[in-house]
Image: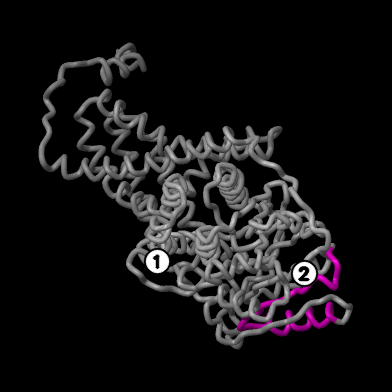
């Protein structure tokens, strides 16, 4: 009896016993479930293979990069720094202080604070600008009241009165170092360079588990995606901040347009189609602030997901009609359509348990033969991609990333509800306002946020995430009931991902209010700082 309960006996009964071999036969109901299931898995695997390709191209062309400008200006050109802000009263002083501390001749510099705020930020920003202007800094305050075009509209309005030949842009949560401008400007001495992007770093990277995962996600983008694309000559995008444009490149690309939520990527592709070359400087760092709350992070990700799909609908036909090489066209498809994986994940989520039940009677070998290559291509590629980026940035401590990988993958799964909604809105042509990410000005663990008034909650999405998490918990019970233990770890990621994002969205911030006895955004005299988009 003891021997029959051994693990060896279990393996024999599960994978070596041929008693019921051949009893299962295909039927139309199973095909109706499994065909779309495998179609989705294959598409996700294709995007996964592309992640491997980016890693390969990055390391293959690693030496194809020169961090030094090929030329230098004999005389420094005039530069305009634009600071688009919207309800940023808690970070605007930090931003202006950093910008006014930049090392550049004052007679060649112009600073524009482009304020679309609807709350007390207008008074705070105007006073700060007046103070620094009185000290002799070339800074001006421009306030709009209609928010037409949102951030793109503000940048366009500032550009119309700007005097600089080159335009540097920083969002409110960025703190560029004093030497940033001097490290970047001489790259424009090459006459065909239209934009230079620098790498984001993070002031509050170690604030929480969420910010550590966010930092790893962004590191993958800035190290491998940008690195591989720029070193192989493919198109890549301005990230909306911590970069500098040649004014003529903006004009030749058609200027700032606000028909997508990612105006930066939209203009990037238009400008590169017009013939301008972009450069990326990973060694030039610009510190920024990561969202510390799940709702803010999800809102940010949904805006990016929707904006990229909008840009793909707008730009891919123009890219296909252009004279750029086929390689660039193919990479543009991968880049701009990658967020289609989120609604595909929803389809896979709905079909996973029925497909599991159907396939349980097919035998383990058939399941392994099909599932293992697809899993390796889609899911394992995520681990390889982010491990490689951390190894590049932190060669001495990158092994710690293994600890964060399960949480990173779970978080990616948990984003499927809000990001799928955003992608479907883009595909259906549903417009929504530009939802900025609130800045809380916290850097160290344990710091309290001053910006509780900017906290907004997602209403329905967290409950949907919790329900889906329960759905996968039932799937785990099913696998254990049928002694199919090897699929349980994969399903646990789904449970953790959906419950983590759902519970954090519902509970984060409430503990702070219970401790302080106050509620967020209780001052009704202050207009709502930003629209809730998801």
Q: Residue at x 65, y 78 (%)?
A: 158
Q: Helix, strand, or loop for circle 2?
A: loop
Residue beneath the point at 49% across and 61% down: 304
Where residue 353 is drawn, which disc sits there? none
Q: Say above or below: 520 vs 294.
A: below
- Residue 176 drawn at (x, y percent): 75, 60
Report which quarter residue 510 is drawn in.
bottom right
Looking at the picture, the colour scheme in use is one colour
Q: 510 and 495: which one is in front?
A: 495
Image coords of residue 73 (percent x, y): 79, 58
The total of numbered circles placed on residues is 2
Disc 2: CA contacts within 10 A as few (<14), some (14-19) or many (>=20):
some
Mark 1–mark 2 Cα distance, whole angstroms, equals 49 Å
Residue count near mark 1 (Cα–Cα under 10 Å), binned few <14, some 14–19, many ≥20: few
Q: Which residue is mark 1?
A: 460
Question: What segment is highlighted magenta in the picture?
Answer: 104-133
Q: Considering only vertical position in the picture, is 433 above or below 1?
A: below
* Residue that mark 2 sits on: 78
């Amino acid at each position: 009896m003891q021997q029959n309960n051994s693990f060896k006996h279990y393996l024999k009964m599960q994978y070596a016993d041929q008693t019921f071999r051949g009893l299962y036969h295909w039927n139309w109901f199973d095909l109706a479930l499994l065909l779309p299931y495998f179609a989705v898995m294959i598409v996700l695997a294709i995007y996964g293979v592309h992640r491997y390709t980016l890693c390969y191209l990055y390391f293959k062309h690693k030496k194809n990069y020169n961090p030094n400008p090929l030329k230098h200006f004999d005389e420094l050109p005039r530069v305009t720094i634009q600071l688009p802000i919207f309800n940023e009263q808690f970070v605007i002083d930090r931003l202006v202080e950093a910008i006014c501390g930049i090392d550049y001749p004052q007679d060649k510099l112009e600073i524009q604070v482009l304020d679309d705020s609807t709350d007390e930020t207008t008074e705070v920003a105007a006073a700060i600008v007046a103070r620094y202007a009185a000290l002799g800094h070339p800074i001006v305050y421009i306030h709009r009241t209609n928010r037409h075009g949102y951030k793109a509209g503000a940048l366009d309005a500032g550009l119309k009165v700007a005097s600089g030949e080159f335009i540097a842009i920083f969002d409110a949560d960025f703190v560029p170092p004093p030497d940033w401008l001097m490290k970047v400007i001489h790259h424009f001495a090459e006459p065909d360079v239209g934009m230079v992007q620098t790498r984001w770093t993070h002031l509050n990277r170690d604030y929480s588990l969420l910010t550590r995962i966010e930092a790893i996600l962004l590191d993958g983008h800035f190290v491998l995606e940008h690195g591989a694309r720029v070193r192989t000559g493919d198109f890549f995008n301005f990230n909306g901040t911590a970069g500098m444009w040649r004014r003529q490149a903006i004009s030749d690309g058609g200027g700032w347009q606000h028909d997508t939520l990612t105006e930066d990527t939209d203009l990037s592709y238009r400008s590169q189609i017009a013939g301008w070359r972009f450069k990326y400087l990973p060694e030039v760092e610009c510190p920024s602030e990561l969202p510390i709350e799940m709702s803010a992070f999800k809102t940010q990700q949904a805006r990016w997901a929707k904006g990229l799909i909008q840009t793909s609908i707008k730009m891919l036909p123009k890219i296909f009609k252009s004279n750029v090489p086929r390689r660039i066209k193919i990479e543009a498809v991968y880049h701009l359509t990658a967020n289609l994986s989120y609604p595909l994940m929803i389809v896979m989520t709905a079909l996973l348990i029925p497909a599991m039940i159907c396939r349980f009677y097919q035998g383990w070998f058939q399941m392994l033969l099909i599932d293992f290559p697809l899993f390796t291509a889609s899911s394992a590629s995520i681990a390889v991609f982010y491990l490689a980026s951390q190894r590049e940035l932190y060669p001495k401590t990158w092994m710690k990333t293994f600890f964060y990988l399960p949480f990173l993958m779970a978080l990616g799964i948990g984003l499927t509800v809000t990001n799928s909604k955003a992608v479907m809105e883009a595909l259906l042509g549903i417009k929504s306002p530009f939802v900025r990410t609130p800045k809380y000005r916290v850097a160290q663990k344990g710091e309290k946020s001053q910006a509780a008034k900017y906290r907004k909650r997602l209403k329905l999405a967290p409950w949907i995430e919790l329900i889906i998490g329960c759905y996968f918990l039932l799937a785990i019970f099913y696998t254990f009931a049928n002694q199919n233990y090897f699929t349980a770890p994969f399903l646990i990621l789904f449970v953790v991902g959906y419950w983590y994002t759902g519970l954090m969205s519902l509970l984060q911030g409430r503990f702070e209010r219970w401790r302080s006895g106050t509620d967020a955004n209780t001052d009704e005299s202050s207009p709502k700082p930003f629209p809730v988009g998801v």
